[in-house]
Image (cartoon, grey):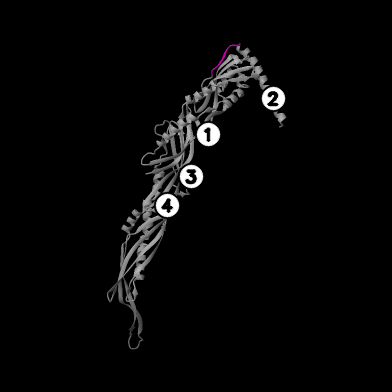
Amino acid sequence: MSKTDVHYESTTMTTRNAALLTLLSLAVPVLTGCHKIVIAPADPVGAGGPVLVSAQPSYITLPVTVKLSDVSTLINQQAPRRVADTDHIHITIPHIHPHGLFHKPTVTHDPIEVAHIDYNAERGDIKLAGSGDKISVSTSFNGGGRLVPPDITADASGSVAGSSTLTVTQDYSLKPVIDLNVNIDHAAVLNGISVKGLVQDKVNDAINKFKGQIGPVIGQMVDLRKHAQDAWTKLPASIAVPGTKDLWITLDPQAFMLDGPHANADTVTAVLSLKVQVKTLLQAEQPTAPPRVALPNISAPPADNKFHLSVPIEVVPEELNKELALLIRDKVISTVEFDNGSEVAVINAVTVLPSGNQFYLKVGFAGVKGTWAKNVRGTLIFEVHPVLSADKQTLSFDKVDYTVETANTLKGLGLEVLLNAGRPIIVSILQKKIVVPFSHPLQEAQSKANAEVAKLKLPPPITLKFNLDDLAPQDLLVYGNKIYLGLGATGVASATY
C-alpha cells in the first residue's frame, strides 16, 4: 500500500468515526431527555486462585569433606605394621637308588636346605597428603635378615612413595587408582647374599595389602551416595516462608551433579550439587507435592551453580494512587476530546484496583462540553496489564480495555459513543499518558525482600545457608486483591545435615 493509500484509508476511518460520533451524539439526548447520566459499573470481584510467581531450576550445594589425617589414622590401624618370614636356601644333591643286582639304579636330584634367612620389615606411619585430584602416599620402613648358619645379621631400610587419583563413578562410588613404588635406600649383604631383593619383595607384598584398603576407607568416610540419598529424601517438597501469608516455595529435586573430589593438603572436598526445580506460589493451601523418583546417577557438573528464587513483596496501592493523583493535578491527564473537539470531557481521577488476580484502573470521567458529553459523568473501569520500564523505574499500562461490567453499563445507558468510537480515544490516552515513577516502591520492596531472603530456612535436620548475590526486580502481579512485585534473588545456597 502506498503512502497516499495509507493516508486515504486513515482519513476515511477518521471521517467514519467522526460521523459515527456525531450520529450517536444526536441520539443520546433523545434517549436521555437531556438528563444527567451517571456511569457507575460494579467493581469487579473475585477471590482469584493460586498464582505461580516463578518456576526455574536452582542448585543447592552439599560440600562433603574428609580429613586425610583421619583416613591415615584408620589405615594405620587396619594395615599390618610388621611382616616377618623365613626364606630357605636349598641346593640340589643327586641320590642313587639301587634296585637289586639285576636292575639299574635310578638317580634323583633332591633339594636340601643348607641355610635359611629369617627376615623382617617394619613400616612407619602411612602418611597421606592431597593436591588437586591426587593423594600422595608415603611411609618408611626398616628391615633386616639373619643368615643361619653361620648366624650373622644384616639390615635394610627404605621408603614407599606414590599417589592415588580420585575418581568417582556415576553410581557415587570412589574408585581410586593407586600407584606405589618401593625404594631400598640401604641393604647389607650376608655372605654374598643381598637381603635387598628379599626385603623388597616382602614390602611389596605388605604394600599390596594396605594400598587396597586406602580407596575403600576414603570411600567409606566420604560416602557420597549416603549424602546424596539423604539430601534427595529429606529435602522438603514445600516450605512456607516465615512471617508471610500464602507464600510457598516448592522444591522438586531433578538431578545430582558433582564437582571434585579435590584435595588440598589434609582435606579432600567433593561438592554435590542438587538440581531443584523451584517454584514460588501464592496460594492459601500448601501445594501438593509431585511424586519423587529414585535417586539418579551423577550427571555432568552444572553451568550455573546458583540458587534462583522469586520473592513477591506486597506493594501498597496507595503508593501508586499518590503518583496517579499527581498526573491529574499536573494535568498530564486531563481533557478528552471527541468528534473533533465538539464533545469534551475530563479525566478527574485515576486509581488502581487489584481484584481477583487482575489489575484494574478506575477512571473518574466528567463531560464538560457538547451535546451529549456535558450530561455524562461517573466512573469507567478498565482491565490493564502493568508494565515496568527496562530499568524498573517507571510504571505504565498496556492491554487496556473496558471491564465486562463497564461495557454492559455503557450499553445499558445507551452510551454506545463511549463503548465504540470513544473507546480507542480513552484507551490511547491511558496507555500514553500514564507513566508514573516506581523508584520508591521498588526501594521499599528490595529492602523487604532482603529481609525475607534472610528468613529462608529448611526444616531440621537440614541447615540451609543462602548468600545473596543479586536482587533484581521482575514484574508486578496481583494475588486476590493485593499487588505484588516479584524480585529475583540469586545467590549460592548450601545445605548441611
CB-based contact (under 8 Å), mark 1 and mark 2: no
Among numbered discs 3 and 2, the one appearing first in the sequence:
2
Q: Residue furthest bottom?
A: 101
- Could you classify mark 4 by the number of other residues whose Cα lies within 10 Å: few (under 14), some (14-19), or many (20 or more)? many
CB-based contact (under 8 Å), mark 3 and mark 2: no
- Could you classify mark 2 by the number of other residues whose Cα lies within 10 Å: few (under 14), some (14-19), or many (20 or more)? few
Amino acid type at mark 2: Thr
Give the label on residue 391, or none.
Answer: 1
**Pick the front one: 79 or 254:** 79
Q: How many marks?
A: 4
Tag 3 residue: 304
Give the label on residue 11, or none.
Answer: 2
Q: Measure the C-alpha gap from mark 3 to mark 2.
A: 56 Å
Q: Is residue 84 magenta?
A: no
Among numbered discs 1 and 2, the one appearing first in the sequence:
2
**Pick the front one: 137 or 95:** 137
Amino acid type at mark 4: Pro
Q: Is residue 39 magenta?
A: yes
Amino acid type at mark 3: Asp
Residue 291 seen in the current view: no
Among numbered discs 4 and 3, the one appearing first in the sequence:
4
Tag 4 residue: 261
Label 1, secondary structure: give it. Answer: loop
Residue shown at the point (34%, 78%) measured from the top left: 91
**x%, y% of residue 111?**
33, 78
416 left or right, relative to 199:
right
- Could you classify mark 1 by the number of other residues whose Cα lies within 10 Å: few (under 14), some (14-19), or many (20 or more)? few
Q: Which residues are magenta?
A: 33-40
Q: Measure the C-alpha gap from mark 1 to mark 4.
A: 42 Å
Among numbered discs 1 and 3, the one appearing first in the sequence:
3
